[in-house]
């Protein structure tokens, strides 16, 4: 069991470099299955989700090397072995093996995807699309066996622009017979990153990043290359930390455009951000003002930064209304924040956050990945010592978190008991 111990209230100076996006790389690795050629993926973050996916590829017969943030994958000898619960339940993104296996092998045998317990997280949109494309699906208690003679391109309308379903349909469509159109597709930057990778292999994907994506199936794919985009959630988390504790605190290797919603809300709260070419510098801001946050699909305020932002709002003067619109259970961290002295009333998927409250160090839990980030932020601004348990969740999404923060002046210890 790992925990982190934070001595709060240390100002942070210097530069934090942002790694590759978790939510991109967890799709890019299963996407590599689509080709027998060699794939090179650069700017890969060293996080546990990546290690789990590498182990899964090796189990399937891949040759993989991972060194200096570069992942080289040779899937020429991969076989469509069953992906058991042991692998699939560790991360949500294991569902991308559905799309890539159906494309390459016309079959997949996989257990239910795992991931953070932030809602019911069904995969019905993925399954309906597969079925429309000619896949026969058998499900038994979270175990899926799917078969098709050959995937067929179709027009597919999504009731909701699901990130996972958009990527899964792209993976299914690149080698399918004919043309696929995804209508009401998700537009998150990670989708564009995956489309670039597919096109580098010879796929024909047009319109990624817009709500209509057209994919014309090709016979075969060849070698592929992609550089993972910067992790906008990691960058956003550090920008929030810098707004509370920074002294010339630079968040480097970012794409500003991916962070517009957060930047706008931080500015509304009174934070002054200095935007450079690929970086933003921020300072601790006094007299922060309350702001209302409503999460939404891209380019709205990303749900993954909602919990970190809730910790920030405890430091703002006045009453902020926080509303989550994507998941049912994004507020499980609230009792832990209140235990540290916050004044938050949570109801349905909303919370009223009254500030400014002086937080004090306590023993708390990371109930999921982004809840862990919220507790980390709270611990860093609190007086005294905060211990966060169950931080395996947190380490899944933040590369070298403790080192990155200690290098700029934080006092955080990672303890493995
Ligand atoms: C991805 C991200 C996650 C992020 C989310 C929204 C990964 C690995 N995870 O998750 O960090 O919070 O996008 O930006 O990339 N839904 C259905 N049926 C479906 C699919 C989704 O009802 O078939 C619902 C979900 O329960 C949720 C909402 O749609 O309420 C959003 O889901 P989706 O966009 O698919 O997110 P994920 O791909 O799971």
Image (spheres, rainbow, N blue to C red):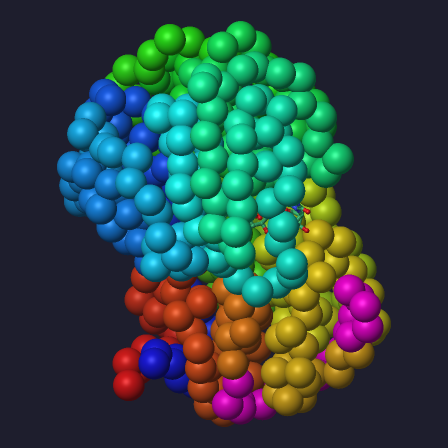
Residue at 33% from the left image edge and 44% from the top image edge: 82
Residue nearest the observer in this picture, 92 or 324: 92
- Residue situated in front as seen by the camera: 130 or 356: 130
Residue at coordinates 70% horizontally, 31% vertically from top-left?
A: 158
Looking at the image, residue 53 sits to the left or right of residue 59; the answer is right
Question: Front-most of 245 and 50?
Answer: 50
Q: Quadrant of residue 189?
A: top right
Residue drawn 74% across and 58% down?
324
Q: Examine the rendered structure and indicate whether residue 366 appears above or below residue 228.
A: below
Image: 333 above or below 269: below
- Residue 79, x across and y down, in percent: 25, 34
Q: Is residue 305 visible?
A: yes
Q: Is residue 297 above or below residue 32?
A: below
Quadrant of the drawing holding the C terminus: bottom left
Percent coordinates x, y for residue 7 in the rendering = 43, 85
The image quarter containing residue 392 is: bottom left
Magenta-tinted stretch: 346-364
Residue shown at the point (23%, 33%) measured from the top left: 78
């Amino acid at each position: 069991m790992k925990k982190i111990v934070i001595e709060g209230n240390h100002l942070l100076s210097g530069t934090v470099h942002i790694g590759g996006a978790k939510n991109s790389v967890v799709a890019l690795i299963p996407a590599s299955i689509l080709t027998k050629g060699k794939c090179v993926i650069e700017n890969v973050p060293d996080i546990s989700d990546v290690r789990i996916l590498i182990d899964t590829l090796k189990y399937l017969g891949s040759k993989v090397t991972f060194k200096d943030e570069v992942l080289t994958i040779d899937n020429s000898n991969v076989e469509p072995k069953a992906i058991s619960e042991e692998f699939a339940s560790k991360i949500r993104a294991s569902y991308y093996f559905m799309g890539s296996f159906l494309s390459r092998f016309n079959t997949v045998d996989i257990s239910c995807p795992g991931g953070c317990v932030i809602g019911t997280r069904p995969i019905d949109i993925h399954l309906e699309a597969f079925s429309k494309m000619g896949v026969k699906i058998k499900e038994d208690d979270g175990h899926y066996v799917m078969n098709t003679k050959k995937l067929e391109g179709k027009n597919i309308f999504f009731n909701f622009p699901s990130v996972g379903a958009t990527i899964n349909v792209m993976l299914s469509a690149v080698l399918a017979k004919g043309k696929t159109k995804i209508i009401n597709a998700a537009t998150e930057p990670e989708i564009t990153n995956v489309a670039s990778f597919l096109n580098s292999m010879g796929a024909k994907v047009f319109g990624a990043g817009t709500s209509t994506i057209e994919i014309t199936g090709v016979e075969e794919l060849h070698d592929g290359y992609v550089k993972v985009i910067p992790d906008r959630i990691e960058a956003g988390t550090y920008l929030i930390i810098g707004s509370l504790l920074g002294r010339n605190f630079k968040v480097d290797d970012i794409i500003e455009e991916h962070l517009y919603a957060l930047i706008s809300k931080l500015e509304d709260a009174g934070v002054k951000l200095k935007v450079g070419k690929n970086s933003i510098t921020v300072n601790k801001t006094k007299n922060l003002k309350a702001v209302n946050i409503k999460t939404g699909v891209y380019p709205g305020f990303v749900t993954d930064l909602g919990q970190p932002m809730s910790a920030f709002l405890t430091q703002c003067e006045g009453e902020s209304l926080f509303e989550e619109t994507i998941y049912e259970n994004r507020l499980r961290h609230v009792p832990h924040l209140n235990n540290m002295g916050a004044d938050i009333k949570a109801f349905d998927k909303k919370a009223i956050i009254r500030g400014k409250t002086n937080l004090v160090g306590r023993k708390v839990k990371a109930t999921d990945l982004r809840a862990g980030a919220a507790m980390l932020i709270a611990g860093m601004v609190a007086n005294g010592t905060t211990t966060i348990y169950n931080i395996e969740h947190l380490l899944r999404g933040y590369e070298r978190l403790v080192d990155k923060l200690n290098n700029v002046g934080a006092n955080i210890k990672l303890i493995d008991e």
